[in-house]
Amino acid sequence: MEKWADYGISAVKFNDAHTHINKVRVHPDNGDKMGAPVEQARTDIVNAIKKGITFVTIFDGENGKWKKGQPVKIIKIKDIEYIKTVDNAKEVDNLDNLPEF
């Protein structure tokens, strides 16, 4: 497997209003496979992206292998930073409809 990013995000946990992600499950991308997941706060992901660390969404695929989703980026709307895979005007975090935990 070719390295897709520094990390893959496989699941999300939203706030009660379902507008911001509170935590994500992050896997290090080791090139040949994804590493074990750890939970990280949304703010950690935003700060990491600002430092040049790359993230991509990942999904369960066939035979236990991960499928690559989309790159994760910061989109600023009305001075609020959202983490998204799609640059749209919606004032919510959006990571490819990843499963919630």
Image (tube, rainbow, N blue to C red):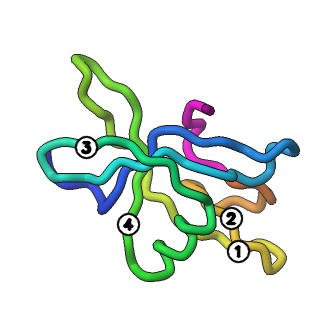
**Residue at disc 4, secondary structure:** loop
Nearer-N-terminus badge (3/2): 3
Residue at (29, 33) in percent of width and height: 66
Q: Which of disc 3 and disc 4 is earlier in sequence?
A: 3
Disc 2 marks a residue whose amino acid type is: Tyr
Of 90 and 18, nearer the camera is 18
Q: CA distance from mark 2 to mark 4?
A: 15 Å
Is disc 2 placed on a helix, strand or loop? strand
Apparent side of residue 45 relative to residue 28 in the rendered image (left or right) = right
Q: Earlier in the sequence, mark 1 or mark 4?
A: 4
Q: Tell me if residue 66 is in the magenta stretch.
A: no
Marks 1,2: beta carbons within 8 A: yes
Q: Residue furthest top?
A: 63
Q: Main secondary structure of the magenta part?
A: loop
Q: CA distance from mark 3 to mark 2?
A: 25 Å
Can I make out residue 31 in this image? yes
Q: Quadrant of residue 98?
A: top right
| Horizontal and vertical percent position of residue 76 | 70, 74
